[in-house]
Structures are given as C-alpha cells and as structure tokens.
Image: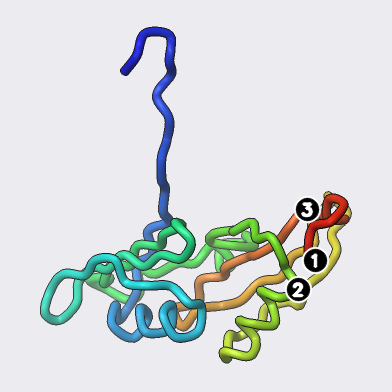
Amino acid sequence: MSAGRSPHIVRGAPYFLVADVASTGAFYASVLGFTCEYSAGDPLEFALYSRDGHAIMLRRAPDPGLIRPIEAQGGTWDVFFWVDDVGSFHRELESGGAAIVYPPTVQPYGMKEFAIRDPGGYVLGFGQTWPPPQGAAG
C-alpha cells in the first residue's frame, strides 16, 4: 500500500445457506442472469455466482432448518442491488419467471425499487435513486 493511501474494499458478497446449491445456482443463472464463477464439491457444497461484478455465495446448509432469511426475522431484504434502470430490470426478471415480492414502487426515501424471492426464500431488492438524474433511464 502506498503511503497516504487507505486500503479499498474491492468486492463483497452475501453468503446464503441453501438446501441445494445446484438448483439454487440454476435459478440465479437462468432467471437472474448470473454466471457461475466457481463451484466445488460433489454434490455441490459451494458456488459463487455473479452479474456485472456483483456476487452471491451459495453454501449447502448442513441442516436446512438453519436457513433463516431476514424476512422471516422481521427484515425486508437479504441483499439489495442498485441498478441503472429499475423498470427494465424488473421486466427482465419478471419475464424470466422471478417470484415478485413487490413491484417497482417509489419509496418516500428517494428510491424506486422492487423485490424478488429466490427458491430458498431469500429476498433480493433492486432499485435506483428516484427520480432518476436528468437523462438516466428509469
């Protein structure tokens, strides 16, 4: 590291316990457009899926009863992604068969967002600042 320069976080990823890594990964690939970067185990124990440089890690739960999405604990999303065109992104995921938790909605905190649920019950939120900056898609 250079003198006077702070280190930077270069990537992050939520870590989801799942009952079946292969079927959950297939959902992330076919419905959400993610690509498998890495997988290990036979049967699959772990996989890393990403889209546009943003990743999600999937790990087979030793006991599916240990899986506790945040929604079941009173929260909203397990992960939230900012997108550059929330309307187009919603149409893409909906046409791919994603289970919509709520449609694109303008929130009082300056976001237009929607959410989907994956096969394991995890809720993924997607949104953009609203209203979008001049000339941005929405």
Question: Which residue is the site of mark 3?
Answer: 129
Q: Is residue 19 left or right of residue 133?
A: left
Question: Which residue is the site of mark 2?
Answer: 87
- On residue 138, the disc is 1
Q: Amino acid at mark 3?
A: Thr
**Residue occupying image coordinates x 51% and y 78%:** 32
**Residue occupying image coordinates x 84% and y 50%:** 133
Indicate whether 53 appears above or below 121.
above
Report how far apart the C-alphas of labels 2 and 1 lie in the structure. Answer: 6 Å
Residue at far top of view = 3
Report how far apart the C-alphas of labels 1 and 3 lie in the structure. Answer: 9 Å
Q: Are marks 1 and 3 in contact (CB under 8 Å)?
A: no
Q: Residues within 10 Å of mark 2 (few under 14, many from 20)?
A: some
Q: Earlier in the sequence, mark 1 or mark 3?
A: 3
* Badge 1 element: loop
Q: Quadrant of residue 45?
A: bottom left
